[in-house]
Image: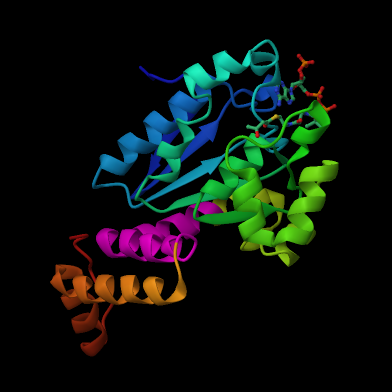
């Protein structure tokens, strides 16, 4: 009995896999899928046995954007009243590290969802863009902000104003993705990265994520101060003692994730 109809959720040891699964619509993100992805990610985030969450799509599309058919008839008051897409903020607020494994189209909301993840791995078939302008709208799930922070104004402006897309090579050169892998290896690689992250101390990995994300929210002085406070705090964890003891004893650490 699976509670979801637009996604699949599987466990792989301490890693978890969320697969977007509306293949006929190239995984277009409708409101139901937003609710399901957010609910799944929040449930995994609450589960102490989850150390990393991978989000992926199909070979053809990670997600080709928000669902155009669903948005087309909406009025301003419909969008404002429902605070359309605000639910995605809860995905970005998940504390467990997340990995986007992107093959095929990551356009509009699909690119935005990938950019909300902490690590972005691209198959050599991946295509990224914010083509909303071609539909007479603008990005609505953070694309104008996260793309600009990731690749800088020059490319972000061109992509948002012309709707041009980037292939995986350009996305990697621009700093949008951490690595390109052959399409056939994408899921294996993403799960390997996730299992590596999940093998670390869970609270310390969350703190590392929080510290890196702070770089996008504050000044350097405040960010470095925040980092130092959190650095001091990790000395309250059992895993700091284990990690440093294991190093000294020349053995692999066995983190208890607390
Ligand atoms: N919403 C709804 N349905 C979509 C969709 C979307 N974003 N993207 C693709 N689909 C549907 C198509 O309508 C089509 O359905 P039918 O078979 O019922 O006609 C099916 O998926 C397959 O798509 P195509 O036939 O178009 O496939 P293609 O290979 O010829 O083209 C594509 C692929 C270039 C990705 C093309 O589908 C496309 O341009 N999609 C829209 C991309 C886009 O504009 N995304 C931004 C959406 S707006 C947004 O995301 C706002 C935001 O910031 C949150």
Residue drawn where x is 54% and y is 53% of the image: 190
Q: Nearer the viewer, residue 166 or 149?
A: 149
Where ligand 1 lies, by image quadrant? top right
> Is the C terminus in the top left, top right, bottom left or bottom right quadrant?
bottom left
Number of numbered discs visible in the structure rendering: 0
Which region of the structure is painted magenta? 190-217
Drawn side of residue 59 relative to residue 136, left or right: left
Q: Position of residue 195 (x, y in %)?
A: 41, 57
Q: Looking at the magenta stretch, what is its main secondary structure?
A: helix
Residue 42 in magenta stretch = no
Residue drawn where x is 23% and y is 82% of the image: 244
Q: Is residue 25 above or below residue 91?
A: above
Residue 204 in magenta stretch = yes
> Is the N terminus in the top left, top right, bottom left or bottom right quadrant?
top left
Q: Position of residue 207 (x, y in %)?
A: 31, 63
Q: Position of residue 62 (x, y in %)?
A: 65, 38
To which quarter of the image does residue 169 belong?
A: bottom right
- Res 100 seen here: yes
């Amino acid at each position: 009995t699976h509670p979801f109809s637009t996604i699949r959720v599987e466990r792989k040891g301490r890693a978890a896999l969320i697969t977007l699964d509306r293949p006929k619509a190239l995984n277009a993100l409708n409101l139901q899928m937003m609710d399901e992805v957010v609910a799944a990610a929040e449930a995994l985030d609450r589960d102490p046995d989850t150390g990393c969450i991978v989000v992926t799509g199909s070979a053809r599309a990670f997600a080709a954007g928000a669902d155009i058919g669903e948005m087309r008839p909406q009025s301003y008051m419909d969008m404002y009243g429902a605070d359309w897409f605000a639910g995605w903020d809860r995905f970005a607020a998940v504390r467990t590290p997340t990995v986007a494994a992107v093959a095929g189209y990551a356009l509009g909301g699909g690119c935005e969802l990938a950019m909300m993840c902490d690590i972005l791995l691209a198959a050599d078939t991946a295509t990224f863009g914010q083509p909303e302008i071609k539909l007479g709208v603008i990005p609505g799930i953070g694309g104008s902000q996260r793309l600009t922070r990731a690749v800088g104004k020059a490319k972000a402006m061109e992509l948002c104003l012309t709707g041009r897309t980037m292939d995986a090579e350009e996305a990697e050169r621009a700093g949008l993705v951490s690595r390109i892998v052959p399409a056939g290896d994408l899921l294996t690689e993403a799960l390997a990265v996730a299992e590596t992250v999940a093998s670390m101390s869970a609270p310390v990995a969350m703190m590392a994520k929080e510290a890196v994300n702070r770089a996008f929210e504050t000044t350097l002085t405040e960010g470095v101060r925040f980092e130092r406070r959190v650095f001091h705090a990790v000395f309250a964890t059992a895993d700091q003692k284990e990690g440093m003891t294991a190093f000294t004893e020349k053995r692999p650490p066995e983190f208890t994730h607390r």
